[in-house]
């Protein structure tokens, strides 16, 4: 039984296979409409979500399966003190696969040790978000036709942003990627990502504090929200929240074929006028989230098209 807890749980070859399948589904989903008939997906969300939970549910419904689950810890027996281990043991009796989001880093990994069904990490604290990474990779590949030989700017909360950590971890394996890390000093990439990902792969990178310093060289700009919920005090959040804001004016210095990605939700880090720029790819990215999650469910349940 295979779980997806960390982006490295799939090799480069497996990741590319999954992206191929997601592309096929995007082109024509009809052959997959009944592939998961009789199967049940459980969504166990201990933290708020719109895209991840609903795109997982949409994915399973589009495969002909069913869904059950909870959208907050308060509406489950977790509020009575139940452990993740006991919850997943019970859910294994009711469902065939589960997606779990949890505020504590490592909770989905713990669940996988006690689970009778495949566990998918749908985001654990400030740690990892591997299905967002698959969504990001699919979007980058569709925009650029490849996953190597490019300069990617990662902007915003690089300290707490789990989508950034997962994306870097996966992308360094594809080769010839140059990273420009755009953030205020206090929100820089954590040391363990710097050591284990960038330095371990000798990936070229530079750190800057403003979008203007990076814009002309970028092929991909990956914007992120400042993660208010992970700050220890409100004062720091207020001081840092407007550090990097993408405007139409700043985009004037960018390449004409730049793609702007954002895992969403956004707060104010991309102004609404940017949405009308053909380089804005973040809603297409949200759509791709359904296709990659359909492909992932098929792969983990080992089911093929009907
Ligand atoms: N991208 C993402 O994880 O969005 P949600 O928090 O809405 O699931």
Image (tube, rainbow, N blue to C red):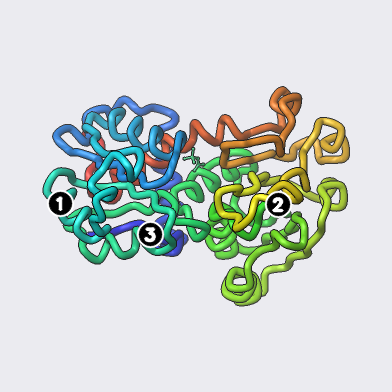
Whether residue 146 is situated above or below residue 52 in the rendered picture: below
Residue beneath disc 2: 235
* Disc nearer the start of the sequence (2/3): 3
* Disc nearer the start of the sequence (1/3): 3
| Mark 3: secondary structure | loop
Q: How far apart are labels 1 and 3 at the CA level?
A: 20 Å
Q: Which mark is residue 5?
A: 3
Instruction: In this rendered view, identify the residue nearer to me: 15 or 126.
Output: 126
Query: In the drawing, does residue 202 fall left or right of residue 77?
Result: right
Query: In the drawing, does residue 208 fall left or right of residue 66?
Result: right
Q: How far apart are labels 2 and 3 at the CA level?
A: 33 Å
| Mark 2: secondary structure | helix
Taking the spot 78% from the left edge, 63% from the top edge, the residue there is: 207
Percent from the top left, x then y, of residue 20?
A: 43, 44
Whether residue 295 is situated above or below residue 196 in the rendered picture: above
Could you classify mark 1 by the number of other residues whose Cα lies within 10 Å: few (under 14), some (14-19), or many (20 or more)? few
Residue beneath disc 1: 90
Cβ atoms at labels 1 and 3 below 8 Å apart:
no
Taking the spot 55% from the left edge, 49% from the top edge, the residue there is: 229
Query: Which mark is in front, 1 or 2?
Result: 2
Could you classify mark 2 by the number of other residues whose Cα lies within 10 Å: few (under 14), some (14-19), or many (20 or more)? few
Q: How far apart are labels 1 and 2 at the CA level?
A: 41 Å
| Mark 1: secondary structure | helix
Query: In the drawing, does residue 235 fall left or right of residue 139?
Result: right
């Amino acid at each position: 039984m295979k779980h997806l807890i960390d982006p490295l749980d799939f090799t480069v070859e497996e990741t590319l296979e999954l992206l191929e399948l997601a592309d096929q589904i995007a082109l024509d989903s009809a052959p997959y409409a009944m592939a998961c008939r009789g199967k049940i997906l459980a969504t166990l969300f201990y933290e708020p979500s719109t895209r991840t939970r609903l795109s997982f549910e949409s994915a399973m419904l589009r495969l002909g399966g069913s869904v059950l689950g909870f959208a907050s810890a308060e509406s489950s027996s977790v509020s009575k003190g139940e452990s993740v281990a006991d919850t997943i043991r019970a859910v294994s009796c009711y469902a065939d696969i589960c997606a779990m989001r949890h505020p504590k880093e490592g909770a989905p990994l713990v669940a996988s040790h006690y689970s009778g069904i495949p566990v998918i990490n749908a985001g654990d604290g400030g740690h990892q978000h591997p299905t967002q990474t698959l969504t990001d990779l699919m979007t980058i590949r569709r925009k650029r036709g490849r996953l190597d030989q490019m300069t990617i700017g990662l902007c915003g909360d690089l300290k707490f942003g789990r989508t950034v950590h997962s994306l870097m971890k996966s992308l360094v394996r594809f080769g010839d990627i140059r990273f420009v890390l755009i953030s205020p000093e206090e929100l820089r990439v954590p040391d363990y990502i710097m050591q284990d990902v960038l330095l371990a792969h000798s990936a070229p990178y530079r750190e800057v504090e403003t979008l203007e310093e990076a814009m002309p060289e970028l092929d991909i700009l990956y914007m992120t929200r400042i993660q208010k919920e992970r700050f220890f005090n409100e004062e720091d959040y207020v001081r840092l929240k407007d550090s990097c804001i993408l405007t139409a004016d700043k985009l004037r210095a960018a390449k004409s074929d730049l793609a702007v990605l954002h895992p969403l939700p956004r707060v104010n880090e991309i102004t609404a006028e940017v949405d009308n720029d053909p380089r804005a790819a973040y809603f297409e990215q949200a759509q791709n989230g359904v296709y990659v999650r359909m492909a992932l469910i098929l792969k983990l349940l080992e089911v093929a098209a009907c």
